[in-house]
Amino acid sequence: MLLALTLFLGTGCTMLHQTPTGAPTSRAAPSVTPSPKARDILLAQQFDLDMEGAGPVSCRDDLHQLTRGHTNQQPQVWVSSGEDATGASAAVAAGLGEESRLCLHGFPPGEPITVTIKAGGRTYTTSVKRLAELTAAPSALDDLFNGRPVEVVDIGGGLLESGSWTFLPSDPALTDIARSGRFTVSASSGGVRAESKVPLRLPRGATAMEGWEDNHRLAVYGYPAGTPVPIGLYRPEHRWNGRVAVLQREVGRVVMPAHRVGVFTVPPDVFRGISAEPADDEDPACLSVADLAACVT
């Protein structure tokens, strides 16, 4: 199921420009009081499922930006989600719910490397596993925070690059990072050490959380605090000009807390519906959130 989620998310989340209309409402009890000044955001009636996703994340492109194109053998470590799709910032940052990579530069070849993340007064440590090529082992949404070794390959010029994963730490790291808007990553190998502060990018979106099959939870993020964000059930349809997802109904809402990352638990009947195997000539139903044009399950 997580593989399917990753494929859907790889299409990216494109902001809608048209003004959609509302749908029948079935609300979940909000955990935060909606702000009286919050803009009422609505679900799109339909969106295109065949839009192109974001470009690949490249540690080499990041290194060129960080060093401004100059040769630099100083050790460096960072986590990157590539370019900001909105163009709002050019900073190298980790985007919540976005494809991300661990990047290391200038560390001695053949020596073990330990990576440490610090967030909210807590520390998370993992080892780096150098390989000739990445294996097909599935990544986890909470990579770097779950203690599992992170695979990297040498892409030349002293640059090590991990495989990609969807950046969504589990709590308490998720809440800690969202509240502070950044985290610290460091790497050490013998007497060589590097550290950087990684800004958190909060695009509007939603991602199925680690353990989705059991907890049925979506992380919803990036909307203004106090905004009630509706979650919609969509049914894919084939049209003459491509595939579209058509709104069936609203299944609930989550009110954005102050740190702008909320959690929505999908009702059991809805989860059964989107998890069921579709007929041979049908695509599975999916969930999406307001102001977006992408399935998030």
Image (cartoon, helix red, strand yellow):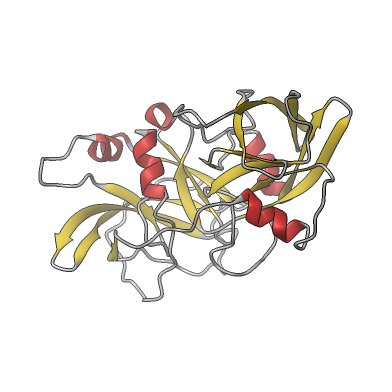
- Residue 85 on image: x %, y %: 53, 64
User: Is 284 drawn above or below residue 216 in the view shown?
Assistant: below
User: Residue at the spot x=41%, y=62% of the render?
Assistant: 292
In the displayed orientation, state which residue is furthest to the right.
191
User: Is 96 drawn above or below residue 293 in the view shown?
Assistant: above
User: Is 16 drawn above or below residue 148 in the view shown?
Assistant: below
In the visual, does 101 lie left or right of 140? right
Quarter of the figure that contains the C terminus: top left
User: Residue at the spot x=66%, y=36% of the render?
Assistant: 173
Tag count in the figure? 0
- Residue 96 on image: x %, y %: 57, 49
In the visual, does 294 lie left or right of 284? right
Q: Nearer the viewer, residue 297 or 233?
A: 297
In the displayed orientation, state which residue is furthest to the front.
156
Residue 79: quarter of image: top right
User: Is 258 drawn above or below residue 277 in the view shown?
Assistant: below
- Residue 210 on image: x %, y %: 49, 32
User: Residue at the spot x=59%, y=55% of the render?
Assistant: 82
Q: Nearer the viewer, residue 49 or 39?
A: 49
Quarter of the figure that contains the N terminus: top left
